[in-house]
């Protein structure tokens, strides 16, 4: 079509009027038969008129309006639209909502609305206003002083806000204070941040939704979902990202391809082991290995994070065994995979006991890992607890309180029974300070007395109870039952 418009430019100055009409007739006929496959630039009234006569009256109104919309930044084209017959303007306002809904229209592409708006357009333009997102609404408000249009745009803002409140249960509003501390920060604020990134990564915001920028935004969102404690959701999200990238990514530079896989690998080494511990605690290693093999075949799992799962399986059964040799054997394998870290357990310590200096170093490592690799931190804590139970080490008051405090942190992040249970409390409660003991015992007491049905009943009859400061345990228990981890 662009070539035809160029040919038309060359004949407009022809002195032979009949020859001009004859050539134009031929060009119009060719235009009607030419599909719209690439963007067409037109910056003159004459060019728009040719397209109008060629396409508008030949059942190709949408193609005509697509070209018109793409060129409204040119003043002659905008003037043509303003002076066009009323039926053309009416048809254009009907076309525009469909086009906005089905194409990735940038706010700047809609500036013409502010420039040509008249109050008489209000009934027809309402269908367009109802298609605008927050960015486009704010942009147009900044470009118009017309009171009528400003009111329509402000009304749209209110509707969008109400929609967010309804869709996100009020969590999308960042102005409200929250009191829901977890391992990764306040959970409500994390959810708000996640919502923002999910909105930013929406396919409608990208001309090509399968580029590295969007994939990286999606992995950021998946990481935040994990930090919110929503393991299944995070893993499902990562599976979608991985599948989409495999099937729909455009040919990208090798360095960007490596970046995507590195981001996925780093996140999966934290998500998959915790998921396996929580949902398949008795076969955590096999569960994690099979998830990698079945769902992420092109991503090689790092050996050490999975080896920690083998250690966990050994720790669980070692309470009833006399020997700790199997624990020592797997610990030494982890030491070989992580030579830069302090060894988990030395051979001679099975007889002489773990000294205080080694114990302090273990605490330092598990504290450092608590956020990056929570499952490794947790399993190190479980190793310390087993060694204390077996009499191989002695927990001082401060260290015991610190250990229990870490269990509570993990439980507040993800209220799973593996992070807080009777055996753990019975072992550590006599060793810790009053505050840590009270928090842990309160969690256990409520988890025994409040089942899923009771929590739902309380939420229905006394919702204000779940909003009270200091009642986070009830909220955590409800979340734990909802996620199926209690």
Image (cartoon, rainbow, N blue to C red):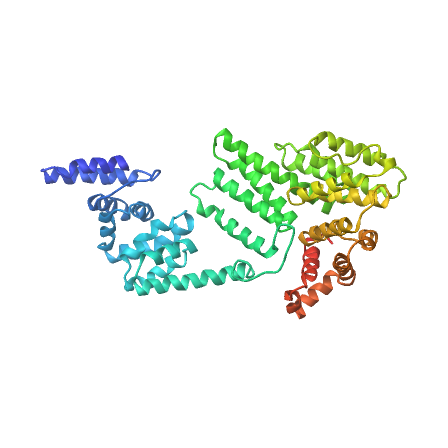
Residue farthest along the left direction in this orientation: 15
Instruction: Determine which quarter of the picture holds residue 470.
Output: bottom right
| Left or right of 207 in this view: 439 | right
Q: Position of residue 257 (x, y in %)?
A: 52, 32
Which of the two residues, 205 or 346, is positioned nearer the viewer here? Answer: 346
* The C terminus - image quarter: bottom right
* Rendered position, 35 above or below 95: above
Q: Is residue 337 above or below residue 230?
A: above
* Total numbered badges shown on the rendered structure: 0
Q: Nearer the viewer, residue 172 or 105?
A: 172
Q: Picture quarter containing residue 154?
A: bottom left
Please name the residue shown 30% across and 53% down the image: 112
Q: 467 left or right of 317? A: left
Residue 363 percent location from the top left of the image: 73, 43
Could you tell me which residue is drawn at 45 percent across and 47 percent down? 204
Quadrant occupied by the N terminus: top left
Q: Does 189 appear above or below 250?
A: below
* Front position in the image: 403 or 141: 403
Residue 481 placement, left or right of 102: right
Residue 256, percent across and down? 50, 33
Residue 265 shows in this picture: yes
Residue 418 visible in this rendered orientation of the protein: no
Q: Position of residue 276 (x, y in %)?
A: 71, 43
As drawn, the residue found furthest toward the right would be 322
Name the side, left or right, on which 365 lies relative to 164.
Answer: right
């Amino acid at each position: 079509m662009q070539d035809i418009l160029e040919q038309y430019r060359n004949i407009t100055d022809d002195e032979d009027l009949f020859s001009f009409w004859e050539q134009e007739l031929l060009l119009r006929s060719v235009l009607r038969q030419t599909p719209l496959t690439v963007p067409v630039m037109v910056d003159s009234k004459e060019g728009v008129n040719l397209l109008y006569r060629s396409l508008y009256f030949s059942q190709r109104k949408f193609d005509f309006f697509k070209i018109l919309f793409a060129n409204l930044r040119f003043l002659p084209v905008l003037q043509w639209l303003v002076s066009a017959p009323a039926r053309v303007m009416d048809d254009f306002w009907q076309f525009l909502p469909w086009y906005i809904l089905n194409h990735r229209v940038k706010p700047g592409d809609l500036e013409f609305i502010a420039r040509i708006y008249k109050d008489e357009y209000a009934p027809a333009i309402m269908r367009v206003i109802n298609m605008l997102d927050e960015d486009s609404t704010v942009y147009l408000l900044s470009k118009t002083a017309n009171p009528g249009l400003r009111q329509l745009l402000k009304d749209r803002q209110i509707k969008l806000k109400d929609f967010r409140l309804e869709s996100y249960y009020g969590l999308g509003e960042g102005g409200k204070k929250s009191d829901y501390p977890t391992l990764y920060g306040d959970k409500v604020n994390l959810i708000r941040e996640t919502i923002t990134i999910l909105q930013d990564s929406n396919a409608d915001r990208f001309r090509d939704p399968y580029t590295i920028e969007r994939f990286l935004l999606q992995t950021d969102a998946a990481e935040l979902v994990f930090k919110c404690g929503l393991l299944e959701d995070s893993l499902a999200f990562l599976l979608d990202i991985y599948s989409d990238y495999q099937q729909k990514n455009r040919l990208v530079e090798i360095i960007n391809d490596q970046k995507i896989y590195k981001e996925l690998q780093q996140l999966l080494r934290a998500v998959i082991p915790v998921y396996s511990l929580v949902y398949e605690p008795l076969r955590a290693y096999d569960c994690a290995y099979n998830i990698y093999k079945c769902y992420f075949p092109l991503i090689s799992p790092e050996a050490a994070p999975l080896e920690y799962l083998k250690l966990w399986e050994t720790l669980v059964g070692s309470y009833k065994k006399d020997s700790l040799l199997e624990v020592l054997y797997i610990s030494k394998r982890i030491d070989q995979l992580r030579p830069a870290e302090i060894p988990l357990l030395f051979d001679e310590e099975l007889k002489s006991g773990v000294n205080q200096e080694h114990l302090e170093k273990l605490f330092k490592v598990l504290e450092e890992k608590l956020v990056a690799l929570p499952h490794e931190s947790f399993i190190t804590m479980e190793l310390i607890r087993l060694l204390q139970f077996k009499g191989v080490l002695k927990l001082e008051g401060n260290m015991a309180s610190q250990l229990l405090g870490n269990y509570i942190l993990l439980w507040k992040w993800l209220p799973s029974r593996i992070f807080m249970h009777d055996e753990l409390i019975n072992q550590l409660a006599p060793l810790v300070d009053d505050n840590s003991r009270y928090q842990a015992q309160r969690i256990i007491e409520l988890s025994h007395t409040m089942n899923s049905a009771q929590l739902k009943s309380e939420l229905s009859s006394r919702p204000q109870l779940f909003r009270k400061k200091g009642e986070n345990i009830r909220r955590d228990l409800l979340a734990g039952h909802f996620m199926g981890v209690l």
